[in-house]
Image (cartoon, helix red, strand yellow):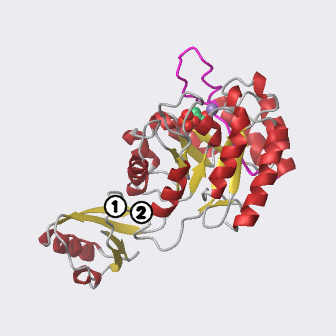
């Protein structure tokens, strides 16, 4: 179960509550986030919640059957909204597109992308400066100095930044220059990294692992929340299947299921989800129709020349068409 605690709970009340739970055979883990204080309590036997609900220091109490607790929709009333400031919000009715190259390629690439974004009204720019690549000989990103340059240009234009953090040692250096830290598919179950991202006060977009289940994604998100950071976005980016006609199998089902099982915003990545440029737009539309709170899409002035993932990258015209159609789809569906 999830026990919401009073903000002003005293240490005596806290101790008494933990002891009461213990006497019923329940363990309890204390979680202190930017927004609240919780006890996640796990036990084998059934417990009459009323026995706990009246204890001093308890604000509310919820039975959560899911193996993940704090990210579950079973306790939180309503959906989570991630507020990036300057009116840029994701979730609970707020929709965004995140666009940009697979990897940030340099100053001109940043300037071109931002100009394009402004023409279509996109507010969040994606791009890697640390790139996980299947081959050690592929381009692996321009690193922290390029992130600083990107931040300088983007903030002057009111554009927010999402970029991938690959290891614990990068977090501190990257933090001042990012609005959302992305955890890539290959790191989706790097629990040390997730623990540390739970200790910061910046949004984290967690991608589903290449062969990860929906439940595993939610359990990974739970690590971030349980360490104190409620600002989490879940991302479906396609999973590995037997199909060879495209790069990954975009699991549209997962979008609907995640929206139901969790209160967190759900982001769709159709670029990696299908991995073939000419199908990316269709999969973006399907994702929006399934309820995605944002799409993250690779866009480049000249995809053929992109330093990575050009084969799944839209050009500016395709990106504009996609934005227009997403707008229409959202109007029709009213979501
Ligand atoms: C990316 O977004 O550029 C990326 C590497 O994604 P993923 O981790 O989903 O492969
Ligand atoms: Mn990519």
Vertical side of 210 occupied by 84: above or below: below
Q: Is mark 1 on a helix, strand or loop?
A: loop
Q: Nearer the viewer, residue 215 or 11?
A: 215
Q: Which residue lies furthest to the top in this view?
A: 137
Residue 12: image x %, image y %?
24, 75
Magenta segment boundaries in residue numbering? 121-144
How far separated are the C-alphas under marks 1 and 2? 7 Å
Of the 4 image quadrants, the one containing the N terminus is: bottom left
Residue under the image location 54 percent in, 40 percent down = 238
Q: Specify the label residue 72 is tagged with.
A: 2
N-terminal of the pair, mark 1 or mark 2, is: 1
- Left or right of residue 299, residue 43 in this image: left
Residue 167, visible in the rendered structure: no
Q: Is mark 2 on a helix, strand or loop?
A: loop
Residue 308, visible in the rendered structure: yes
Vertical side of 101 occupied by 21: above or below: below
- Left or right of residue 9, residue 88 in this image: right
Residue matched to label 1? 66
Residue 184: image x %, image y %?
52, 38
Residue under the image location 40 percent in, 54 percent down = 222
Of the 4 image quadrants, the one containing the C terminus is: bottom right
Which of the 4 quarters of the picture holds residue 45?
Answer: bottom left
Residue under the image location 53 percent in, 58 percent down = 256
Give yes or no for contact between labels 1 and 2 (Cβ–Cβ under 8 Å).
yes
Residue 11: image x %, image y %?
27, 72
Which of the 4 quarters of the picture holds residue 151?
Answer: top right
Q: Specify the label residue 245 is tagged with.
A: none
Quadrant containing ligand 2: top right
Q: Which of 176 and 131 is in front in this view?
A: 131
Magenta span: helix, strand or loop, mainly? Answer: loop
Vertical side of 127 occupied by 222: above or below: below
């Amino acid at each position: 179960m999830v026990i919401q605690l009073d903000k002003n709970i005293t240490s005596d009340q806290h101790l008494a509550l933990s002891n009461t739970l213990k006497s019923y055979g329940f363990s309890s883990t204390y979680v202190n986030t930017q927004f609240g204080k919780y006890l996640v309590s796990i036990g084998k036997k059934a417990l009459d919640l009323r026995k706990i609900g009246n204890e001093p220091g308890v604000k509310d109490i919820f039975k959560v059957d899911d193996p993940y607790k704090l990210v579950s929709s079973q306790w939180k009333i309503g959906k989570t909204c991630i507020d990036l400031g300057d009116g840029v919000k994701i979730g609970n009715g707020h929709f965004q597109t995140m666009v940009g190259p697979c990897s940030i390629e340099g100053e001109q690439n940043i300037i071109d992308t931002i100009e394009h974004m402004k023409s279509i009204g996109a507010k969040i720019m994606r791009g890697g400066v640390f790139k996980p690549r299947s081959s050690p000989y592929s381009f692996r990103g321009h690193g922290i100095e390029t992130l600083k340059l990107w931040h300088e240009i983007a903030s002057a234009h009111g554009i927010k930044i999402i970029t991938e953090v690959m290891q614990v040692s990068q977090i501190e250096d990257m933090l001042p220059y990012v609005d959302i830290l992305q955890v890539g598919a290959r790191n989706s179950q790097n629990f040390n990294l997730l623990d540390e991202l739970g200790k910061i006060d910046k949004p984290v977009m967690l991608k589903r692992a290449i062969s990860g289940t929906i439940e595993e994604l939610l359990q990974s998100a739970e690590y971030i929340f349980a360490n104190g950071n409620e600002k989490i976005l879940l991302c479906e980016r396609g999973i590995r299947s037997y199909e060879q006609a495209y790069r990954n199998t975009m699991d549209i089902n997962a979008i609907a299921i995640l929206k139901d099982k969790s209160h967190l915003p759900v982001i769709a990545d159709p670029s990696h989800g299908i991995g073939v440029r000419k199908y990316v737009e269709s999969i973006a539309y399907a994702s929006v129709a399934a309820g995605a709170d944002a799409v993250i899409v690779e866009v480049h002035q000249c995809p053929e020349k992109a330093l990575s993932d050009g084969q799944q990258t839209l050009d500016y015209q395709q990106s504009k068409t996609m934005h227009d159609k997403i707008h229409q789809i959202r109007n029709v569906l009213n979501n």
